[in-house]
């Protein structure tokens, strides 16, 4: 147990202090590239010998300077990413990759590009018709643009060999994270909602081989532990980001174990692997994006796959209900809520919807709602 | 004869005909489509499919004060009030809530192009689910550069060809190349005539009130591929030419100042929007819809590029260039910016654009908060104060200029 705690403390320290992590990498002579949400092909950054550094807003952050670029009704992740560009937090980065897949990220890319001219900027367009040949080709073309810029910044050529190597390392990390998510669901008495979050979050601030090494060790220790019956209730979380310690504490205080998730920052980011050892690793990366699904940000050619996917997740993880975390002003999440609600209701799965944003530090309302939800689940 | 009918009446009847055509098609048992405003309309038109336009419908419902009611219906279905008002109105209507303000037949297929916004993608997916109908999707990714690259052209072309196949199946007809060319020619002719109409705003005083363009825009949205639209805009251009010659204008007030109105109007509050403008002699002589809908092309690749040029799909520099171009041409001396609560992509560029307008054009810029469809997001008092402020600064600038 003590080893588990030691590892969890190490993950916690990394998740809570990304700036230190960044400075450490820089002091080792490495360059880091900021990767904004969503679906950045981090493998390219890794293959170019640099550190892909996830930048998903700042929980508990304050928006001040970014108000010069955005009115109040924008997703706080985007606003805080810009804020960190403006206040110098991102200064150590050698560049950023900025996707443009939602209506806030469209202007975000433009605002960041002009507001932070000293940070080399890599724009990324993803296709929504991503599955067909022309969609895969378009993705590959966009990834190639990123590749060229990364090579310029790092001075290292991205070859088939080093890209295949990066893909392998990333697949291993995705596998380890997916395994960890399963284990967290099976061992909630060991892995709290809070510690689950720091383990997953720290991946964004670490070289993935380093993260995998630590995580495999942790997974092994958890697996070797005895399974104990869980007295609380089990939930699946859905949304964009759930990394606020105060919010996660409410889950823990109410014995709501997160046994699976549909969070953009967690499972959605690691669901799909990339084909390994091909002669066309760039195409393999593009095909991976083509295989992404069940996401509010992505067009669903089959129109309504997401509710069924989530229902299945609930059943498979033997969850008692779903906690839907709606990031304020995130219209893709909001507009997909009624379909999700319908799907869950039809399957008889209890759910609760909780509004949040990254500036929030007081979660009184969420506390009341989650407490009530835990009570309701206990009566079922 | 039609020459004697005023152009604005002709234009209005074209839109009415689009919707009547859809009702007639429904009656005959033919499929009716709903289309986003910047979906390549050429395909459905060439295949003779009847199509309605939810954005146009939502604007019309809002202008007739049904916006809030429909938005509230959508909210009761679980759609957050943060979601675009047009989308909420449209989803409520698709879900079966009636809107006498602008009824249209329910859809049998959907044509979605997300060049305007990504909200469109999910809005149309939601409607496709409600009705269990096919959705034809043309995705236009956001573009960070002034030029549209070949990668975009190829990707959109691939989808365009797929869309033709899907619509051939839906219509039960084969695409006729000659007909397609004819439709494209009409579309180009309409765009050219539209731009010609807009160009009359450069005259000082202007031969028309720029707010008129917001009404005429319905034709460019719903019927740009029809010959009668091109003819009606050409007729309007002739009338405007006459106005210039005879010193007439549809702007019935003194033209003390000329402004750009930035953004989609607050349809539920057209009167309150117009009131302080007319009282202060501020004619709107620039709206971004002029360049945004005036696209011309001479081959298929250029058509793909044209559909990449929507207000929310172009980069900041192009957006600024469009606006500053019409501000200069149309001799604008102030800018009124609508922070549209319904439109995140559009409003998200505005603070930076405001700074550029001030610097590049040397004109005062003020902004107000509003919404294209949901009246709850507009404050008349704030709007009046801001317009008053703009007026005062423009007067000051004018006095300084005259003193030189």
Image: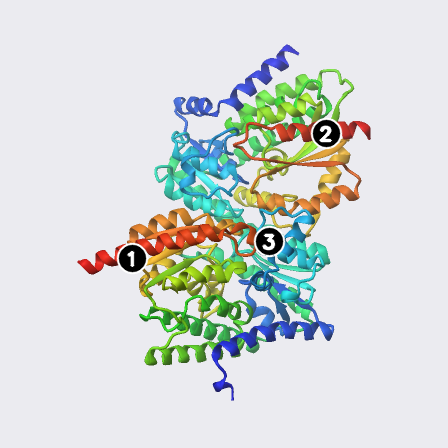
Classed neighbour count for the residue bearing mark 1: other residues with Cα under 10 Å, few (<14), some (14–19), many (≥20): some
Q: Chain of mark 2?
A: A
Q: Looking at the rendered structure, which numbered label has been put on residue A372?
A: 2
Numbered label attached to residue B121: 3
- Residue A243 seen by the camera: yes
Label 3 environment density (alpha carbons within 10 Å; few <14, some 14–19, many ≥20): many
> Label 3 lies in what chain?
B
- In this picture, is B27 found above or below A328? below
**Hey, which residue is sitting farthest right in the picture?**
A380
In the depicted view, which residue is nearer to us: B80 or B326? B80
- Of label 1 and label 3, which has the lower sequence position? 3
The image's mark for residue B309 is none
Indicate which label's residue lies in the foreground, 1 or 3: 1
Circle 1 is placed at which residue position? Answer: B395
Q: Is residue B260 above or below residue A155?
A: below
Q: Is the Cβ of the residue at disc 1 closer than 8 Å to that at disc 2?
A: no
Q: Residue A282 location, x and y as percent? A: 52, 43
Q: Residues within 10 Å of mark 2 (few under 14, many from 20)?
A: some
Report the side of A146 relative to A253 (left or right). Answer: left
Q: Residue at x 44, y 62 (%)?
A: B275
Residue farthest left in this picture:
B404
């Amino acid at each position: 147990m003590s080893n588990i705690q030691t590892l969890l403390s190490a993950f916690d320290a990394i998740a809570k202090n990304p700036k230190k992590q960044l400075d450490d990498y820089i002091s080792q002579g490495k360059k880091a590239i900021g990767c904004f949400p969503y679906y950045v092909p981090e493998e390219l950054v890794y293959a170019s010998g640099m550190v892909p550094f996830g930048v998903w807003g700042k929980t508990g952050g304050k928006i001040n300077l970014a108000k010069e670029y955005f009115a109040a009704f924008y997703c706080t992740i985007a606003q805080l990413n810009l804020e960190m560009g403006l206040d110098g937090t991102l200064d150590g980065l050698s560049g950023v990759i900025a996707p443009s897949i939602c209506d806030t990220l469209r202007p975000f890319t433009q605002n960041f590009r002009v507001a932070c001219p000293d940070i080399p900027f890599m724009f990324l367009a993803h296709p929504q018709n991503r599955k067909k040949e022309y969609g895969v080709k378009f993705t590959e073309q966009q990834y190639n643009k990123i590749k060229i810029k990364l090579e310029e910044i790092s001075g290292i050529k991205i070859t088939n060999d080093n890209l295949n190597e990066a893909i392998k390392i990333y697949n291993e990390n995705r596998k380890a994270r997916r395994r960890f998510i399963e284990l967290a669901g099976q061992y909630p008495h060991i892995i709290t909602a809070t510690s689950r979050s720091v383990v997953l979050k720290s991946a964004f601030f670490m070289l993935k081989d380093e993260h995998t090494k630590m995580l495999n060790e942790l997974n092994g220790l958890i697996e070797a532990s005895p399974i104990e019956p869980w007295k609380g209730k089990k939930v699946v979380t859905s949304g964009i980001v759930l990394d606020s310690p105060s919010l996660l504490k409410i889950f823990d205080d109410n014995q709501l174990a997160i046994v699976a998730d549909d969070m953009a920052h967690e499972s959605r980011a690691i669901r799909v692997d990339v084909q390994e050892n091909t002669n066309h690793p760039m195409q393999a990366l593009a095909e991976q994006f083509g295989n992404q699904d069940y996401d509010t940000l992505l067009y669903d050619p089959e129109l309504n796959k997401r509710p069924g996917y989530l229902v299945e997740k609930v059943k498979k993880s033997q969850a008692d209900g779903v906690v839907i975390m709606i990031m304020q002003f995130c219209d893709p999440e909001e507009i997909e809520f009624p379909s999700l609600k319908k799907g869950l209701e039809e399957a008889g799965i209890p759910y609760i919807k909780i509004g949040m944003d990254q500036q929030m530090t007081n979660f009184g309302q969420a506390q009341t709602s989650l407490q009530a939800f835990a009570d309701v689940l206990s009566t079922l | 004869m039609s020459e004697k009918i005023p152009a604005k009446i002709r234009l209005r009847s074209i839109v009415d005909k689009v919707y009547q055509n859809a009702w007639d098609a429904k009656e005959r048992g033919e499929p009716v489509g709903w289309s986003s405003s910047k979906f390549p309309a050429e395909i459905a038109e060439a295949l003779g499919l009847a199509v309605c336009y939810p954005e146009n419908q939502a604007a019309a419902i809002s202008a007739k004060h049904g916006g809030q009611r429909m938005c509230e219906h959508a909210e009761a279905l679980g759609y957050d009030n943060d979601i675009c008002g047009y989308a909420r109105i449209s989803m409520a209507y698709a879900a079966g809530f009636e809107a006498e303000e602008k009824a249209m037949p329910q859809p049998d297929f959907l044509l979605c192009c997300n060049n305007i916004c990504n909200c469109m993608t999910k809005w149309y997916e939601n409607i496709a689910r409600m009705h269990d109908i096919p959705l034809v999707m043309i995705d236009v990714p956001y573009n960070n550069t002034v030029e549209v690259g070949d990668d975009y052209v190829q990707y959109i072309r691939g989808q365009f060809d797929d869309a033709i196949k899907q619509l051939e199946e839906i219509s039960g007809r084969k695409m006729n190349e000659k007909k397609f060319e004819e439709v494209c020619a009409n579309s180009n002719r309409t765009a050219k005539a539209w731009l010609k109409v807009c160009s009359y705003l450069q005259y000082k005083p202007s031969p028309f009130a720029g707010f008129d363009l917001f009404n005429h825009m319905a034709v460019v949205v719903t019927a740009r591929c029809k010959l009668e639209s091109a003819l009606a805009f050409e007729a309007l251009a002739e009338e405007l030419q006459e106005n210039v010659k005879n010193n007439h204008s549809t702007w019935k007030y003194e033209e003390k100042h000329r402004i750009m109105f930035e953004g989609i109007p607050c349809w539920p509050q057209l009167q309150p929007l117009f009131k302080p403008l007319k009282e202060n002699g501020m004619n709107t002589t620039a709206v971004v819809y002029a360049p945004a809908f005036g696209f011309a092309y001479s081959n298929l690749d250029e058509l793909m590029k044209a559909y990449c040029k929507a207000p929310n799909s172009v980069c900041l520099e192009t957006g600024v260039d469009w606006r500053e171009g019409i501000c200069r041409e149309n001799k604008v001396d102030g800018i009124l910016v609508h922070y549209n609560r319904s439109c995140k992509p559009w409003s998200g560029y505005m603070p930076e654009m405001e700074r550029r307008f001030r610097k590049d054009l040397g004109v005062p810029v003020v902004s107000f908060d509003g919404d294209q469809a949901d009246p709850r997001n507009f404050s008349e008092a704030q709007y009046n104060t801001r317009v008053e402020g703009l007026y005062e600064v423009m007067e000051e600038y004018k006095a300084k200029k005259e003193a030189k």
